[in-house]
Image (spheres, rainbow, N blue to C red):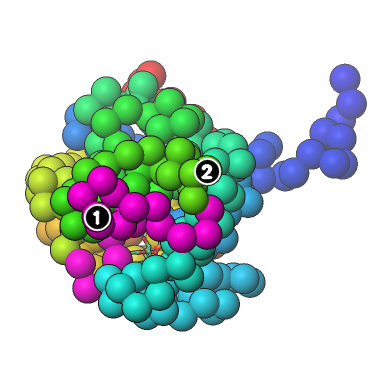
Amino acid sequence: MPDSPPADLPSTDLAPLELPATVRRRAATARRVVAFTGAGVSRESGLATFRGGEGGLWDRFRPEELATPEAFASHPERVWGWYAWRFRAAAAAEPNPGHHALVRLGEIFPQLTLVTQNVDGLHQRAGSRGVLEVHGTLRRARCHRCGTEREMAAAVEESPDEPPRCPCGGRFRPAVVWFGEPLPQDVLRRAAEAAGEADLFVAAGTSATVFPAAGLIDTAHRGGAVVIEVNPEPTAFSGLAELRIAAPSGEALPRLAAALAACRAG
Ligand code: OAD
């Protein structure tokens, strides 16, 4: 046996994650667990985040020109084309070890509620079930007039450059939440309930700047949850966390899941 591991192995994979005693104790008995994710969790799948790091979408594009009902009304082709581009990128991407670790978390804690701000569908493709998509989904298109829904894949294929027409005369748009629009109320209610009742709350890959979704972290903390944050950068909510893991989620979440599983084993 060699004394040391091969040099090309990343050292973060080798070091066991040290959980503070407060987290270990809570993990041993926790029943209700919430994972709350943002764009950072899909970064290692090759998808851009909105803020932070290089190439953030909102550094390159103006949200008011692309992600508002007014933008869709005045420039439907531009808005549709941008979302068609993002849809293709998401469809071509693969779930990364962070997504898979959250599937594992659901096996460790059967009462896991996974709440995501992401619209890319990668959690579901990794195998997570019952995902609460508080900002909607890019996988579906919805008529802005009558509300009829269809698959985004077929809509983009049929009409890559402009929003396809609905039989009612309206136009299809991506079924995502735009600035100035309410979140899907039933989804938000279920997410808020889960956060308020959570024993353990894992926030991963979110800048926690867009409300009301970001408020779930505070809801969970006030409800007594032990909060764990996974993000290379600190956020406004870092101070609420019992444990902050300043590493990419593709590395941190598998190690966190393994460490939490060990707490369950005794
Ligand atoms: P943001 O782009 O605001 O934040 C991404 C976060 O991920 C940042 O805090 C980064 O530090 C972190 N990050 C980057 N790489 C990471 C990695 N490999 N692992 C873990 N974290 C990493 O994304 P969200 O918080 O999801 O809303 O943004 C919230 C909402 O703002 C989005 O849902 C979207 C956007 O406008 C709508 O479109 C309505």
- Real-space CA distance between mark 1 and mark 2, rounded to the nearest whole angstrom: 19 Å
Spot occupied by residue 23 in the image (x, y as percentages of width and height): 33, 43
Which mark is first along the chain, 2 or 1? Answer: 2
Q: Residue at x 32, y 28 (%)?
A: 129
Crowding at label 2, few (<14), some or many (≥20) Cα neighbours within 10 Å? Answer: few
Image point (86%, 30%), residue name: 3
Look at the image and tell me whether residue 111 can be seen. yes
User: Where 214 sits versus 263, above or below?
Assistant: below
Confirm whether residue 116 shows in the render: no
Q: Nearer the viewer, residue 21 or 37?
A: 37
Q: Given the image, on which type of amino acid does mark 1 rest?
A: Gly
Amino acid type shown at disc 2: Glu
Where ligand 1 lies, by quadrant? Answer: bottom left
Q: How many marks?
A: 2
The residue located at (74%, 44%) in the rendering is 10
| Mark in the foreground, 1 or 2 | 1
Quarter-wise, where is residue 222 in the image? Answer: bottom left
Quadrant of the snapshot with the N terminus: top right
Q: Secondary structure at mark 1?
A: loop
Say which of 62 and 103 sits in front. 62
Residue 96 as seen in the image, left or right of residue 19: right
The residue identified by callout 2 is: 157
Q: Which residues are magenta?
A: 160-181
> Circle 1 is placed at which residue position?
169
| Residue 2 image position (x, y, % from top left) | 89, 26
Examine the image and state in which quarter residue 34 appears.
Answer: top left
Q: Residue at x 39, y 52 (%)?
A: 164
Give the crowd class for mark 1: few <14, some 14-19, many >=20 residues within 10 Å. few
Task: Answer whether residue 213 is magenta in the image.
Answer: no
Q: Quadrant of the C terminus?
A: top left
Q: What's the magenta bit mostly, secondary-structure-wise? A: loop
**Residue 203 point in image, percent of width and height:** 35, 52
